[in-house]
């Protein structure tokens, strides 16, 4: 699939220093469309959807909010901490609104693995299927994310 002019503009918004200091693409030199297609293929091969992954992230974030910045136990075997930092970020895709700088850390006590994601990560996965470019500070590998958070397949 060919990258459109609109996608070129969106990719330019993702460069370091435009919205965030480090940007959204890391050292990934692929076109945005190719990043989106690759992550879509990974999610599909897992038998999941971006909606399912984002919904699980929201569920764990919402459970962790009551910990007020401390790790709390979340059934069946997670520890979740939600931290807020001052400020908000716009979506690089140009969606209306801004997203609070909230970091959610999920520790899976059964596997010993953990992952950290932001409210903007949740939005970009849900609305755009975008997990960020390889090497990006907040890149979320869809397979690892689904494994750590134990996203359940639904029929």
Image (tube, helix red, strand yellow):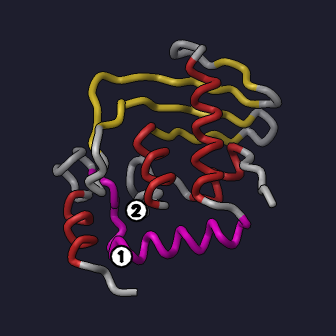
| Residue under the point 79% across and 27% down | 75
| Residue under the point 27% across and 27% down | 87
- The image shows residue 86 at horizontal and vertical percentages of 29, 22
The residue singled out by tag 1 in the image is: 30
The residue singled out by tag 2 in the image is: 133
Q: Which residues are magenta?
A: 23-47
| Residue 38 falls inside the magenta stretch | yes
Q: Is residue 132 left or right of residue 77?
A: left
Disc tally is: 2
**The C terminus lies in which quarter of the figure?**
bottom right
Please, what secondary structure does the residue beneath circle 1 have? loop
- The image shows residue 79 at horizontal and vertical percentages of 69, 26
Please, what secondary structure does the residue beneath circle 2 have? loop
| Residue under the point 41% across and 58% down | 132
Q: CA distance from mark 2 to mark 1?
A: 8 Å
Q: Please determine whether, in this image, residue 112 is positioned above or below residue 76.
A: below
């Amino acid at each position: 699939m060919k990258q459109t002019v609109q996608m070129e503009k969106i990719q330019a918004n993702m460069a370091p220093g435009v919205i965030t200091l480090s940007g959204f693409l890391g050292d990934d030199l692929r076109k945005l469309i190719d990043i989106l297609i690759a992550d879509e293929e990974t999610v599909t091969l897992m038998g999941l959807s971006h909606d399912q992954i984002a919904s699980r992230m929201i569920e764990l974030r919402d459970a962790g909010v009551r910990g007020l910045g401390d790790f709390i136990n979340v059934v069946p075997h997670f520890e979740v901490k939600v931290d807020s930092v001052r400020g908000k970020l716009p979506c690089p895709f140009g969606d209306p609104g801004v997203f609070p700088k909230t970091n959610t850390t999920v520790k899976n006590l059964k596997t010993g693995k953990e992952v950290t994601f932001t409210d903007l990560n949740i939005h970009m996965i849900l609305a755009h299927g975008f997990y960020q470019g390889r090497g990006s500070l907040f890149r979320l590998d869809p397979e690892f994310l689904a494994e750590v958070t134990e996203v359940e397949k639904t029929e």
